[in-house]
Image (cartoon, rainbow, N blue to C red):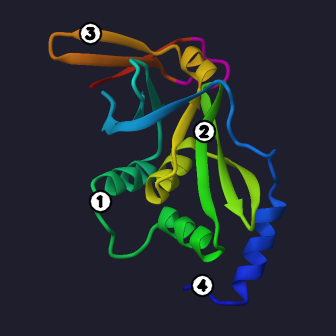
Amino acid sequence: MLPRNLLPCLAAVLCAAGCGGDSAEHRDDVAVSVRTVALDERNAPLVILEENGGERYLPIWIGSFEARSIASQMEQHTPLRPNTHDLAKSLIAGLEGTVERVTVTELRDGTYYARLWLRCDGRLVELDSRPSDAIAIALRTGAPIFVRAPVFDAADEVIESTGDGHRIRAPQPTQPGRTEEATRGVRL
C-alpha cells in the first residue's frame, strides 16, 4: 500500500510525463510473445521475442538484472522482496492505472527503444522505456507486447535452421569508431 501523500505526487508525474493520442495502436505493430530468456555464446543475456502466429524472432540483448526479472516472472517465481518491476506494477495499480500495451518502436545505432502506454484517470499516458523494462512490466500486468514491423527488418537477424532447431545470429553493437562486426548466437 502506498502512502496517501505519495499518490497525488506520483499521479501528477505520470500524467505530466506526456499524453499520447487517443490510441496507442499503430498500423505497423506486430503482436509478439516472450519466447525465452537465454545467454548467448559469450554469456550475455538476451530476451527473444517471437511473432504471434508468425515466423519472425527478435533478439534483444539486455542486462542481467532485467533478464532475471523477466525470467522469474515467466517462471511465476515470486521474489522475497519486490524488485523494481514489481514496484512499478504496484505504483501503477496504486494510482488506479493500467498498462495498455508496450511496443518496441525503433532500432537506432544498435540500441532498441520502446514505449509504454498507461491508462491513468481516463487518459492515455505514453512513456519512453528500455525494452527490457517494458517487457518485464508487461509480463507482470498481462499487457500485450508489440514490435513495430520495421524493427524486425532493421534488426537484420539471421535465422539459421539447424538439425536441432534454429540459431539466431545478430550483429553485436559496436563502439563508435569500430568498424568490425562480430556476431552473437543462441539456439532456440
Say few, some or many: other residues with alpha carbon within 10 Å of mark 4 (under 14 / 14 to 19 / 20 or more): few
Label 2 belongs to which residue?
103
Label 4 belongs to which residue?
2
- Looking at the image, can residue 46 be seen? no
Q: Nearer the viewer, residue 178 or 112?
A: 112
Label 3 belongs to which residue?
161
Q: Are marks 4 and 1 in contact (CB under 8 Å)?
A: no
Q: Nearer the viewer, residue 96 or 84?
A: 96
Q: Residue at x 59, y 44 (%)?
A: 102
Q: Residue at x 45, y 51 (%)?
A: 66
Residue 125's spot in the image, x, y percent? 75, 55
Quarter of the rendering occupied by the C terminus? top left
Please, what is the three-letter code of the amino acid marked with disc 3?
A: Ser
Q: Nearer the viewer, mark 3 or mark 1?
A: 1
Distance of label 2 from label 3 (alpha carbons): 28 Å
Q: Which residues are magenta?
A: 173-179
Q: Residue furthest left?
A: 163
- Looking at the image, can residue 185 be seen? yes
Secondary structure of residue under mark 4: loop
Q: Residue at x 81, y 71 (%)?
A: 12
Distance of label 4 from label 2 (alpha carbons): 28 Å
Q: Are marks 2 and 3 in contact (CB under 8 Å)?
A: no
User: Nearer the N terminus, badge 4 or badge 1?
Assistant: 4
Please state if 187 lies on the left or on the right of 107 as rendered. left
